[in-house]
Image (cartoon, grey):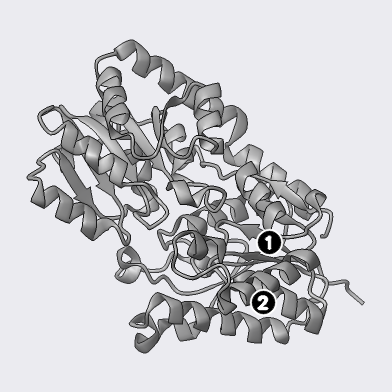
Amino acid sequence: MKREKKRLTILNQYFYPDYAATGQLLYSLSKSLYKKGVNINILTSFPGYSITKKQKIIDEKNINFNIKRFSISKLLAVKRSPKFIKAIIYCINVFIRLLFYENKKDLIVYTTEPLFLPVFGFFLYKLKSLNYIIILYDLYPEILIDLGIIGRNNFIAQAWHYLNYLSYRNSEEIIVLSKDMKNRILKNYKIDPKKIKIIPSWADTKKIHPIPYRKNWFIKKHKIDKKFIVLYSGNQGRLHDLETVIKAAKLLKNEKNILFLFIGDGIQNKTLKEFVNSNNLDNCKFLPYQKLKDLKFSFSCANLGIVSIRKDSLGCVAPSKLYGYLAAGKPLAVICPRNCYLKDLIIKKELGSWTANGDFEELASFIINLRNSKTMQKQLKANCLNYLNENASLKIISENYFKVIQKYL
């Protein structure tokens, strides 16, 4: 009797060509792990973000690993549903499919997209003995509590916290993106520290790398040549400190050759645009999310990349945009709490500047200094590229993932 090969089944609501960072990262990781001999199975939805609604799904027949997209996610009623409803529908699809899963020896990977997906890992483990690991991109309900959306003693928060504890305790391993996230979990849950592995995000240098100014069509298309570009690329969500950025833009409104470029979308997008209009700022420009194949051009248009997290988001998130900037060789301006891992990284590795939350004057000062110093720009670019190649390339990070999962496959 032929023995069936064990598979790694990855669950994530979004997958390439969706522009969600988790989906794009998992796509490149899956390809890399497949080349290492891992049998990959993806359970995801059909693209739902605006940039892909009219974009044809990539020819997945040419991809050697299996991608299963739930057909119900194509229904018009589902597409028009709120994000929370789509997440519920996806989780139900996953639960039903895995409930009748025959490959019990496979290893399941649960992510936090959607945010309550890891909880299903515990129930399916009890019902089907399906072993699993968890990749925590965001910590919930901690984020909702920190933002004041729900109270710490709220019934939902307490129930969610308990279910998280069960899913964490019964997982084979938990992968987090930073030491701050690990410390937050150890503080809130009685979990064996040895179970938690820190594996940061990464950038695929084949997809994102420096593009010379004269060859960058993105700059010409959007008429941003002859500008010193301060770029914020990615999700403009609640967890990111964009108030400090936009106030720095206001302070520098008379510096005509400095442009603040916001690429992406999110709940703060409307507020940012309203601030720009009410203050008559002509040094700010907004563009939508860019396709994966165009990211090397959009990141390379920058002279400085912005990475920010709110003061009350410490240990809950780890911005992946950081690695896109590094891959393009762009100096970093990091806005975060004083005790955040990002501050230590930026200062110790000399990748740019750290600014405390709210200190927009310090941010503006660094922008001016960097613009005025070609020597500083050149040195920081070299530092950024060296750090990425030595610590956070796809080759290095995928090997770290491989070491974790090969024990179970």
- The residue located at (30%, 20%) in the rendering is 370
Residue 238: x, y in percent?
38, 57
In what quadrant of the picture does the N terminus appear? bottom right
Marks 1/2: CA–CA distance:
11 Å
Who is closer to the viewer here, 84 or 97?
84
SS at mark 1 in the image: strand
Q: Position of residue 133 (x, y in %)?
A: 73, 62
| Quarter-of-image position of residue 394 | top right
Visible residue check, residue 15: no
Q: Residue furthest front?
A: 153
Q: Residue at x 83, y 59 (%)?
A: 408
Report the side of 2 relative to 367 (left or right): right
- Determine whether, in the image, residue 18 is placed left or right of residue 348: left
Circle 2 — which element?
Answer: helix
| Residue located beneath label 1 in the image | 134
Q: Residue furthest top?
A: 375
Q: Residue at x 56, y 45 (%)?
A: 201
Q: Quadrant of the C terminus?
A: bottom right
Q: Quick one: label 1 or label 2, which is nearer the N terminus?
A: 2
Instruction: Give the crowd class for mark 2: few <14, some 14-19, many >=20 residues within 10 Å.
Output: some
Q: According to the image, label 2 marks what residue?
A: 120
Horizontal side, residue 129 vs residue 43: left or right:
right
Which residue is the extreme one toward the left? 280
Residue type marked 2: Phe
Query: In the rendered image, is residue 267 in sight?
Result: yes
Residue at 32% x, 27% y is 362
- Residue 379 has which mark? none
